Image (cartoon, helix red, strand yellow):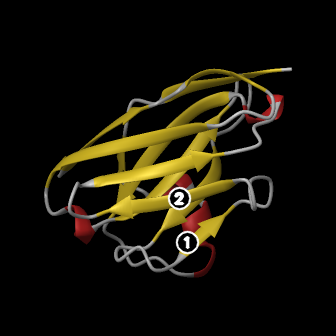
Amino acid sequence: QVQLVESGGGLVQAGGSLRLSCATSGRTFSSYSMGWFRQAPGKEREFVAAIIRSGGITYYADSVKGRFTVSRDNAKNTVYLQMNSLKPEDTAVYYCAATERRMYGSRWYFARNYDYWGQGTQVTVSS
């Protein structure tokens, strides 16, 4: 098993930036594909970004493409989400997630394909 702990959330004005971190412990971090999801009040959890085990390929939701960047440092057992040009509609609780499953195609985008989750970190963007 792997344990996930997010940090870096907070309150920021529109146009600002935040960097989320997700520190992991437990089994070998490089065994896991990693994802970021978010959930706004009254809405379903939605895919934000994902990164393969080696870090060489990334995936993004259309709503964040060009503004967010996912990366990982396998030596530090940590995955990051750099969020730039933030908008009020980015306000949500952000979760990191991990999976050992074989991921391909649309599997990246669905929360049910990730087996381990952090507790979430709140991001609030004011207008």
Report the amino acid beneath label 2: Val
| 1 vs 18: above or below | below
Point out the image quarter for the C terminus: top right
Disc with the residue nearer the chain's start (2 vs 1): 1
Instruction: Name the side, left or right, on which 34 lies relative to 25.
Output: right
Location of mark 1 (residue): 58
- Check the image and name the residue furthest to the front: 16
- What's the CA distance linking mark 2 and mark 1? 7 Å
The secondary element bearing badge 1 is classed as strand
In the image, residue 116 lies at what x, y percent?
Answer: 33, 48
Is there any visible trace of residue 113 in the rendered image?
no
**Residue drawn at (22%, 61%), measured in percent from left and top?**
29
In the image, residue 101 lies at what x, y percent?
Answer: 36, 72
**Residue drawn at (63%, 53%), measured in percent from left and top?**
47
Q: Are marks 2 and 1 in contact (CB under 8 Å)?
A: yes
Report the amino acid beneath label 1: Thr
Mark number, residue 70: 2
The secondary element bearing badge 2 is classed as strand
Q: Quadrant of residue 59?
A: bottom right
Q: How dense is the environment of label 2, judged by Cα within 10 Å: few (below 14), some, or many (20 and up)?
A: many
In the image, residue 97 lies at what x, y percent?
Answer: 42, 50
Residue toward you, 76 or 30:
76
Is there any visible trace of residue 77 in the rendered image?
yes
Instruction: Name the side, left or right, on which 116 lies relative to 112.
Output: left
